[in-house]
């Protein structure tokens, strides 16, 4: 019998061919690979992103702020194609030294303010506009606790389960089982907490919901990794109720479309610069024009 056990070498070396679907963009060093300035539109808020779950968190919040009447939340959303290495351009690295989407630059003050990491962007915008984040006490603590629960838990779902189940060049039982177990435990955490409250952090809709839904809501809808049947997501009834209620919110529907480059062309708005873009500049309309 062949022994497939891996023995790590004494010193790790970079194998450019490893890493599966994302091998071309993964590397063990930081910093820019090329000079490229970031575009700047007419709104104070400039978002540089892609319609992945982390990017969708921010566009949902921006659209919810606009839906609630915060005109100052209007924004330009520029597409960062991570598969083509846009995140390694000098301008993007200046906005986010970690070279991950999303990145936000706020030009509303005397000096531009950069904000990176999706959770930090959510808190920054919620505090800037005084919305979707309780201001004090237990309610604020509960909201922030669930926000950071998502930030700490989702890497097990995405980089763990999603990678080995959907993207790794080979399928191996051990990592898929390991991360499937953890993903189902996380789904159960949400299902239990949603049994007696309308939203994740309590009776009010907050940035905690907006952070969690793009990952766990889309997973519960069967839209993430094609793993709905494998994980038996329909069995989490409380999570399904919350997931489907949020999916019907107009701002959530719009937020899912921004910087999206996959799926139905009618659901893809590669760049967003005005509210009318949802009606005039989705990929189906651009193609027909």
Image: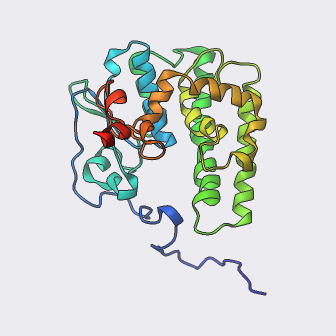
From the viewer's perspective, is 190 left or right of 33?
right
Q: Where residue 71 sits: x, y (%)?
A: 33, 15
From the viewer's perspective, is 169 left or right of 263?
right
Q: Visible in this render: residue 120? A: no
Spot the residue most to the front: 288
Spot the residue most to the top: 69
145 and 154: which is toward the camera:
154
Quadrant in which residue 120 is drawn: top left
Quarter of the image with the N terminus in it: bottom right
- The total of numbered circles placed on residues is 0
Q: Where residue 152 sits: x, y (%)?
A: 60, 42
Quadrant in which residue 203 is drawn: top right
Residue drawn at x 35%, y 52% is 87
Q: Where residue 185 sits: x, y (%)?
A: 75, 42
Q: Is residue 146 above or below residue 103?
A: above
Residue drawn at x 54%, y 32% is 211
202 and 252: which is toward the camera:
252
Quarter of the image with the C terminus in it: top left
């Amino acid at each position: 019998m062949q022994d497939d056990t891996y023995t790590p070498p004494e010193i790790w070396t970079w194998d450019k061919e490893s890493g599966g679907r994302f091998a071309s963009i993964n590397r063990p060093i930081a910093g820019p690979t090329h000079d490229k300035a970031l575009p700047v539109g007419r709104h104070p808020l400039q978002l540089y992103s892609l319609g992945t779950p982390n990017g969708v968190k921010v566009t949902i919040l921006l659209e919810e702020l606009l839906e609630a009447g915060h005109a100052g939340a209007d924004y330009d959303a520029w597409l960062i194609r991570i598969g083509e290495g846009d995140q390694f351009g000098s301008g993007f690295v200046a906005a986010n030294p970690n070279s991950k989407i999303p990145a936000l630059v706020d030009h509303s003050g005397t000096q531009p303010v950069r904000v990176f990491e999706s959770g930090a962007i959510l808190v920054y915008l919620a505090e800037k506009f005084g919305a979707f984040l309780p201001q004090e006490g237990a309610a604020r603590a509960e909201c922030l606790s669930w926000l950071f629960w998502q930030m700490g838990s989702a890497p097990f779902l995405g980089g763990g389960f999603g990678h080995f189940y959907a993207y790794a060049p080979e399928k191996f039982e051990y990592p898929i089982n390991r991360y499937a177990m953890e993903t189902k435990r996380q789904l159960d955490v949400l299902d239990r907490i949603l049994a007696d409250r309308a939203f994740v952090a309590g009776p009010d809709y907050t940035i905690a919901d907006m952070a969690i839904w793009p990952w766990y809501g889309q997973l519960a809808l069967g839209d993430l990794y094609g793993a709905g049947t494998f994980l038996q997501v329909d069995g989490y009834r409380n999570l399904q109720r919350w997931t489907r209620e949020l999916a019907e919110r107009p701002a959530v529907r719009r937020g899912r479309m921004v910087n999206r480059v996959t799926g139905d062309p009618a659901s893809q708005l590669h760049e967003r610069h005005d509210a009318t873009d949802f009606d005039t500049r989705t990929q189906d309309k651009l193609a027909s024009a």
